Image (spheres, rainbow, N blue to C red):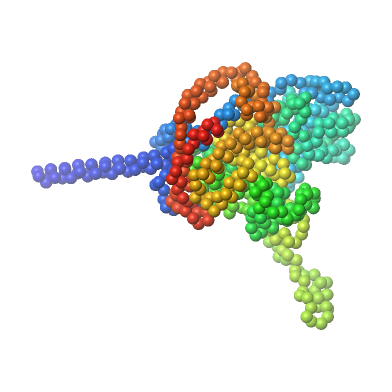
Amino acid sequence: MKGEGKMVIMSKMKWVGLIGLVLSAFSLVVHFLLARYTVEGISDYQSSVTIFSWRPIFENPVFVKNYVNAAIKFLRFVFAVQCYKSPLYRRLWGQVRRLESFHPDANPRGYYAAWVPNLNMHTTDPRSESSGYVFVRIQGGFHEIRNSICDVVAISRLLNATLVIPEIQSTTSSKGISSEFKSFAYLYNEDQFMAALVKDVKVVKTLPQNLKGARRKKKIPSFRVPNSASPYFYLHHVLPVLNKHAVVELVVSEGGCLQAILPPHLEEYQRLRCRVAFHALRFRQEVQELATKMLHRLRAPGRPFIAFDPGMTRDALAYYGCAELFQDVHTELIQHKRAWMKKRGIVKGKLSVNSAKQRLNGSCPLMPEEVGILLRAYGYSWDTILYISGGEVFGGQRTLIPLHAMFENTVDRTSLSAAWELSRIYGREVNLIDTKLRPPPPVQEKKLGEWKNAGLRPHPLPPPPARPKYPHNIEGWWGWVAESDNEPESTVMELRTNAHKLLWEAIDYLICVEADVFIPGFDRDGKGRPNFASLVMGHRLYQSPASKTFRLDRKKVVKLLEENREHLYQANYTWLTSMRKHLRRSLIDGVIEASSKSKRFSFLSHPAPECSCLRYDPTKPVEASLGVMHSCPKWMDSEIQTQSKDKETEEDSDEDVSSSSGLFFKNNGGNNQNGGGELMKEESQLDDQEEIEGAD
């Protein structure tokens, strides 16, 4: 009996011990999750070794729907609610309150003004009889095409003409592109484009049969229109030809064919541009669907994300003389491109430019490492999701290594989609012949004979064989830089890749517009005009003005970086405060500055005040600076009341905030290696009261 009693006691003790172990393991897991998802977002329980990866939280590109179990989802929901209420979350991700009164309003407010010779200004109904057909061929990259389409629609309305769906040369001139999609339909939805503009401009898919034949025979008048041409150029030069021949062809190659800022009496044409860019231009269905899937995958962890566009293209670096930011062959490639631009009159300055002075002047892109430092200085933690956009980052992946070290959840479109998903949007394309290295051709017998009969030795070495033809890529490593002043002709594969880049940038564009925070590294292209990032900022200003969009003053940023160049990863309180103040002010000052700098080159980069309205009284200095005085329609009043109540509940909590965690570079296991040193903990907590009052 005693033995049996001991056995029972021992078995009970085993069960108690087992239950204790299970509870301990469960509490440990919960503890890790609590530490992982606190407001500060920084865990002290990380491994000492972390492998750099594009997607530590996106390990499977297929993204299985049951990504986590219900318990973890519940914990995420609880902590997300807590984070949303916290002052730190509002400072990093919340809306800019001084821009909350702005709302999109591109609806017509009157008739289109038109000019008729020998008569004064009068108004015309958009549905009046057409004066002829306007056929357009557009050349350029993604942002140039988008700008040009909006311009030609406004021009067609100005001329009271019927617009033929524009032809995009980047796709129609490329060999090997899928026959499923041609020209405009390769990138945009034709039916949506035509339906959205039915009350503004008559749009047709093709020319009438008789005019098609005339175009093939090149018997229709053609204009190679200049960039930013005045409305009067079209009214006095193009319109008479259109009336005579009933058709004109416009060739647009400079990324825009109508001046950005129109006279006040043509303001209705500005709103037409907005309706085209933000409502009529919808991407092809397959592109829209893939971008939507990628957005869902980005938001699957239940956290907001930052979109970053580096803007580091070879053309832009060459145009502004930023070759010395790089080393070795990259510097040579930029200088080679600058020489090519100078020969064609694109660049009018000197061939050799002091890149250090250009950088200090704010004329060069910020390096990805510098942007990473800015974001960490503002308070974004190492596990923040950072999406990198752009079809090209000059310098390759090595320029992004420091950024990966600071933000481990750095992703791009290749990380968020499978290869088959990207190939699906290209359509069925023919297989191209693989251009492998070809052997060098033999030495010509004539030259070799001349060498043999050159006379007494020693004489020059025999002529070398011609160099082998490498299947170069325009942004790769070239063997032709020192051989010719001209850029090499594009191969068939490169032409196809250029067409694919339009689709890649369309996906990036949609993701950047919807991002919680957007920050550009550069806002100019290789011709000195607003680039992809500028279009994104303009779209965000129209669609959601209060969303966080950092419009950096690169001159001030570089000055701050140079002041602390030797201790960027050990920044002190004063430097962090100065950098945060600049980033905070850029949310407002950048918008005001863009109205004078970017808008005069591209209206879509700053569509205010023509396409905006106010829900509140225009008494604040921001509204006065931007010139937005138009009140929103009455149907928006119901939304005003609900949002104002929400703001009243938040005002008190914001004003009570005196500090936040403010940690800059905290040592998360010693894996942040950039320059070989450990990143120092910033022990002092920064005062965020001024930041909240200023930014919000």
Residue found farthest to the front: 574
Residue 428 sits in quarter:
top right
The total of numbered circles placed on residues is: 0
226, 197: nearer the viewer: 226
x, y (%) of residue 554? 63, 44
Residue depicted at 87% across the width and 36% down the height: 220
Vertically, is 600 above or below 445? above
- Asked whether, in this view, residue 674 is left or right of residue 444, the answer is left
Q: Is residue 62 in view?
A: no
Please identify the quadrant where the N terminus is shown.
top left
x, y (%) of residue 232? 83, 31
Vertically, is 100 above or below 688? above
x, y (%) of residue 260? 74, 34
Residue depicted at 77% across the width and 71% down the height: 463
- Asked whether, in this view, residue 482 is left or right of residue 690, the answer is right
70, 270: nearer the viewer: 270
